[in-house]
């Protein structure tokens, strides 16, 4: 049985899952973890969602403030053997609900060209590709997306 839990970035299960995410991203893009430390740093964040299968953490995502009316979805990850089961969609929807509860109107995110399944998922959930923003401006592999909540 899958359950979602709202938590924060101090949660040890979040650290386990994001470490696995970092390893996977390095494999996809042929990079080193230290190449993206600045982009992936999540500390003191009160808006993390974890998914559990029984007692086992299997997926995560979080939102952080991007601007006065916009949050950014970060650190989305589902363990590979459970992909394709709607877990990522459930996490994104929970993050969007949480963002609306906090008074935000838009959500942005960044993913990469090497992750076509992620791009497809976000498009299915109503995200539209937009110009690369902030730290992703000029990064060839980045795909930035936006959605009105």
Image: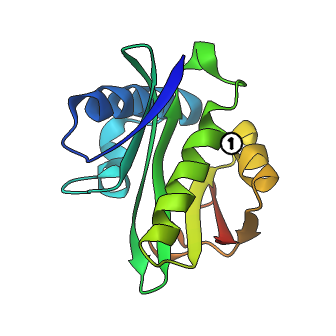
Q: Position of residue 38 (x, y in %)?
A: 30, 57
148 horizontally vs 32: left or right: right
Q: Nearer the viewer, residue 35 or 145?
A: 145
Q: Position of residue 39 (x, y in %)?
A: 37, 56
Where, quadrant-wise, is the N terminus in this rendering? Answer: top right
Disc 1 crowd, CA 10 A, few/some/many (<14, 14-19, 20+): some
- Residue 140 at least partly seen: yes
Q: Up-down: is 131 above or below 46? A: below
Q: Position of residue 32 (x, y in %)?
A: 38, 35
Which residue is rendered at x = 79% and y = 45% of the image? 120
Q: Position of residue 58 (x, y in %)?
A: 46, 22
12 horizontally vs 68: left or right: left
Q: How is the image coloured?
A: rainbow
Residue sitting farthest toward the bottom: 68
Q: Up-down: is 80 above or below 89? A: above
Which residue is rendered at x = 54% and y = 75% of the image? 133
Which residue is rendered at x = 46% and y = 78% of the image? 103
Which residue is rendered at x = 27% and y = 33% of the image? 15
Q: Which residue is mark 1?
A: 118
Residue 55 location, quadrant: top left
Q: Nearer the viewer, residue 19 or 101?
A: 101
Where, quadrant-wise, is the C terminus in this rendering? Answer: bottom right
Q: Up-down: is 62 above or below 81? A: below
């Amino acid at each position: 049985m899958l359950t979602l839990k709202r938590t924060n970035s101090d949660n040890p299960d979040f650290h386990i899952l994001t470490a696995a995410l970092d390893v996977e991203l390095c494999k996809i893009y042929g990079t080193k973890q230290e190449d993206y430390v600045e982009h992936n740093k999540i500390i003191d964040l009160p808006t993390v969602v974890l998914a559990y299968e029984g007692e086992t953490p299997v997926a995560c995502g979080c939102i952080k403030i991007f601007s006065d009316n916009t949050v950014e979805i970060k650190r989305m990850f589902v363990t590979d053997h459970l992909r394709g089961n709607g877990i990522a969609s459930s996490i994104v929807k929970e993050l969007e609900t949480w963002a609306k509860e906090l008074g935000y109107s838009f959500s942005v995110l960044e993913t990469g060209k090497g992750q076509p399944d992620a791009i497809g998922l976000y498009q299915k959930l109503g995200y539209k590709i937009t110009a690369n923003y902030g730290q992703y401006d000029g990064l060839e592999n980045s795909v930035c997306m936006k959605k009105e909540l």
